[in-house]
Amino acid sequence: MSKVEGRAGIESIESVDGDTSFWTDSDALVSCLREAPPRIPSHFGYDALGSNLFEEITALPDYYLTRVEDGLLRRHANDIADELGTPWIAELGSGSAKKTRVLLAACAARRQTTFLPIDVSREMLVSSGDALAIDCRDVTVRGLWGRYEAGLRWIRRERSTPVTVTLLGSTLGNTTPTERRNLLTEITRTLAPGDCFLVSVDLIKPAHIFESCYNDPPGHSAFVRFRLNHLAHINRRFDGDFVLDRFQARAHYNEHTHAVEGHLYATKDHMAKLRALDVELKFRAGDSINVGFSAKFDPSRFVDNMRQFDLIPHTHWIDQRWKYGLFLFHRR
Ligand SMILES: C[S@@+](CC[C@H](N)C(=O)[O-])C[C@H]1O[C@@H](n2cnc3c(N)ncnc32)[C@H](O)[C@@H]1O
């Protein structure tokens, strides 16, 4: 465990996923690049620059998700804290964890609370953990640096108390159906009977709302830079030669899969190589690479599907205007 020396704030950051080696673990990347169209797994979007760009996205005028979730958490923090009742709260993909603070403060007013943020971005763990430990002095913050599965493994090994796992920011939607099943299976394996799972999901609504939300409005470029940064990041990690200005970013809502897909479209015929992986990708003008996946859900189907993971619906809080929900489950 590495103590973050000489500063008030986060108690520790533990590397749970082989330090930086998870960034160079190429298996998932290579198999996603073989899909048609090729895809880059979402965690490659969150190096230090990508994490800051995501924060910029959350402030875009049409990006309602963060603001709506923040409102739900502020309005219902006390009710949620009453229901949770667990001394440990782990957050998968915690990012800046700004919205989580109000919930943690409500939990700490009721019981001793340890927050375990889990994220691939070490920079975000340090800055969010420090801000949290200063804002919510009664909460102990122990950061777990690595991928979700590694953080969950750590919890299975170290847990000595009931646990809530949270997955906010509609991050569950950033998984493909197969990735989602695997992640939910790992979450269920980690929770003991009676433990809680608090998850936010964005609900199905008209396509034009998603298309404004997931594309830059005039005068902004946060989405374009965030999406292109996936290419810059894998160029750096895998000796690649993607030329960023040969691509144009655009997101659209796929009505069949109920997912917003963020694509980079090639503007001319060309090839790109990742020499360290021995991978070569051929693009015709108009071909794309998928760098963003955000599934949207029907609330009753979502809740029913969770039963197969032994997650029993307890309560939910839905913003009716924006059709966005926080759902609380108990592990059977
Ligand atoms: C959509 S952002 C949400 C951030 C924050 N929860 C919020 O609501 O604003 C996704 C977060 O998950 C992290 N992340 C993405 N894939 C991950 C993975 N496989 N393992 C761990 N963290 C991951 C990213 O670094 C980022 O902080």
Image (cartoon, rainbow, N blue to C red):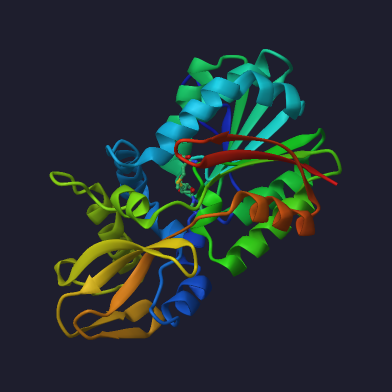
Percent position (x, y) of residue 90?
A: 64, 38
Residue 89 located left or right of residue 55: right
Q: In which quarter of the image is the N terminus?
A: top right
Q: How many labels does the image show?
A: 0
**What residue is drawn where x is 33% and y is 80%?**
275
Percent position (x, y) of residue 200?
A: 57, 42
Q: Is residue 102 above or below residue 295?
A: above
Residue 95 located left or right of residue 282: right
**What residue is drawn where x is 46% and y is 62%?**
259
Front-most of residues 215 and 40: 215
**What residue is drawn where x is 46% and y is 21%?**
7
Percent position (x, y) of residue 218?
A: 14, 46
Residue 270 located left or right of residue 205: left
Percent position (x, y) of residue 195?
A: 79, 39
Residue 254 appears in view: yes
Res 61 quadrant in image: top left
Residue 2 appears in view: no
Q: Is residue 289 above or below residue 174?
A: below
